Image (cartoon, helix red, strand yellow):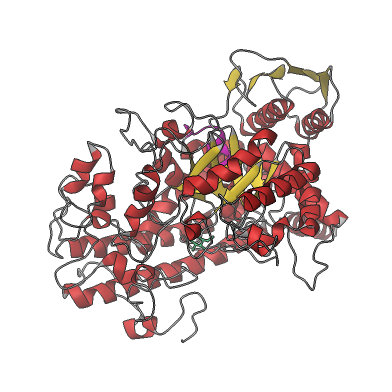
Amino acid sequence: MWLIKGCIIFFALHAFAISVKAENGHDLWLRKQTAHMVNVVCKKQSPMLNIARQELRRGWLGRAGASFTLTIKPDKSIKGDGYKLDSSGVQAGTEAGILYGVYDLLRRQQTGDLTQPVISNPSYERRILNHWDNLNGTIERGYAGRSIFWRNENDSLLTVTENDKDLWLEYARANASVGINGSVINNVNASAKILTAEYLKKVKAIANVLRQYGIKTYLSVNFSSPALLGKLKNSDPLAPEVIQWWKDKVKEVYQLIPDFGGFLVKANSEGQPGPQDFGRTHADGANMMADILKPYGGIVMWRAFVYSSNDKDRAKQAYTEFTTLDGQFRDNVIIQVKNGPIDFQPREPFSPLFGAMKKTSVMPEFQITQEYLGESIHLVFLSTMWEECLKSDTYQQGAGSTIGRCTDGSIYPQKYTAIAGVANIGLDSNWCGHLFAQANWYAFGRLAWNNQLSSEAIAEEWIKLSFSAGDAVQPTTIDNNDWQDRFLVPVKQMMLQSREAAVRYMMPLGLHHIFYPNHHYGPAPWWAPKDVRADWTPPYYHQADTNGIGFDRTATGSNAIAQYHEPLASQFEKPSTCPEIYLLWFHHLPWTYNVKSGRTLWDELCYDYEKGVDEVRGFQKTWDMVQPYVDAQRFSEVQSKLRRQCRDAQIWKDACLLYFQQFSQMPIPFDIERPVNDLDYLMKMNPLTYKAL
Ligand code: GCW
């Protein structure tokens, strides 16, 4: 009888234990802790210092009853919002610095990286999320639900509720915890409406919340706003009435938001208006705004993402257009450059604009949202991609002129330094759609703070903050070493491998932009309707024919290679010295060309696709094996996304191999798995919905 009763209690408790362990991911890397008592010593009072104090009380895992001191005092070794930290206190020159130091301390306590005294200074002064959120609540390239800032007309458009404010506050806290200090809260394809009085009222409400965590608000603006809103006859940046219109508007903005950060502008790009519509240059347009923002301390982030259909090589255009303007921009203009010369592809060589603009401030733009990397379906840890970019050597001022150093003020004396990430955040309960996509938001913040960090260190931190031995289904049966060996190590390995795996099953060896149109999720290397401009179709990029495959960017081709500094240009120019990860980016090569493994190009392509698919199958196994260590909800969500990722990696492989085989006319090596889908079927279905066209 006792035994039966005992069993019932055991099972009841066990069932309860499992059900309370369901977690929806909303707490991100800031999960609740059972904190110890701490005595926070701080002479000053302020709302931000109170937040720092509250965070310490909420998360202190140090010795119970210990004292921890917050000191605001300048120090030569502390730059900007940096800080000095040891186990007894944090010192900073600014209140935000104190807050960042506190988050660092709590992170170290939780991850077991205990405090040697550290001095930590941010690599970039401005660490900014770019939200591509439309004013109707949809998000361009957003895969985690609707906007956290904007709603549609049927949904009480511009009202601000307590729930909104609570959510923005949680968002701001998450950002501050990784050092992000700016948000552009609307799409770069900007509606002029954002600058109307009614929208600005809402912008002010958002800014009031974000400010509490040290986050500045910025806006994307439409270059034609003077004509569209002000009813002027045009928006020529040199016309006095246009300048006056912007002056009045900027004044209105700063009256509402005194610490407003500035404007982000996508001009003369993909149909957006810009100064060239009036025969003016990008510098004319950017400087007009910069002069007006300057007295208020505002900046202009002007995007270099420009290309037109009449050029022979899209990859060359931003460089051609912007290097000629070097030296003409005001010091509060920063040119925002995507990591690659084309567009956030799974792999691109770095944009040659980095380091080449020597008299102009330049900031990197990364895409956190996975437009080209499997949306919120594929598990792809992007930190390795950004690390690859930041550590790429441009050689512009000799060896060691990495992109990190060319943009963070180490090499060029930029008045402002900044970095942007296109956000992957929406109303989904876990914010990012995929649990592991949270790691990309986290990694962006960490790299923006310290562009030298390794992806391995970032992944390890994120895992330790987002999961713990206590999550295990039977936590008493595992100790921390078990957890490290059987959970942390394999999950970290999976994350670190995931981007390379995606490159392999999507577009290995330097292939790029062979995506299905519009949604950019699955493959469509064949897609080229006659009425669509060539540079929007995959064959423009892969150039496959019976002779071979790849885009010839050598001296006898488009000569895009000449935009790179030596020794890179010479290295890229010859197929034998070109890194194979960029081979087909720079070269059109015969199918029978011998790559370094000794295989033909065709065989290598086949093995790469195969390997990519195999790696995702491996991720499935890894995840299933760690099931005992994860709560049920997060486990099954990731498990089912991995299944879909596997199916779709197979589709990538089958589509690309069967399509390119029509040109190579060579067999798929017999020791790899055969395709399981017919090309004809793949060409007639939408890879996102699986529906027939
Ligand atoms: O990658 C492309 C996207 C567009 C985006 C554009 C840009 C905001 O497909 O959706 O528009 O880049 O960066 O401006």
Against 92, residue 528 (above or below) is: below
- How far across and how far down the image is residue 541, in percent? 31, 65
In the displayed structure, does residue 529 sit left or right of residue 424? left
Does residue 633 show up? yes
Q: Which of the 4 image quadrants contains residue 534?
A: bottom left
Q: Nearer the viewer, residue 371 or 295?
A: 295
- How far across and how far down the image is residue 251, in percent? 74, 44
Secondary structure mostly seen in the magenta stretch: helix
Let me know if residue 479 is in the magenta part: no
- How far across and how far down the image is residue 538, in percent? 34, 70
Q: Which of the 4 image quadrants contains residue 449?
A: top right
In the displayed structure, does residue 25 sit left or right of residue 122? right
* Part of the protein shown in magenta: 444-453
Residue occupying the point 19% across, 72% down? 545
Q: Nearer the viewer, residue 436 or 452?
A: 452
How many callouts does the rendering have? 0
Q: Nearer the viewer, residue 486 or 515?
A: 515
Q: Quadrant of the N terminus?
A: bottom right
In the displayed structure, does residue 149 sit left or right of residue 188? right
Does residue 462 show up? no
Against 367, residue 638 (above or below) is: below
**As drawn, which residue projects farthest toward the top?**
76
Residue occupying the point 33% across, 28% down? 397
- How far across and how far down the image is residue 338, in percent? 45, 49
**As drawn, which residue projects farthest toward the front?**
240
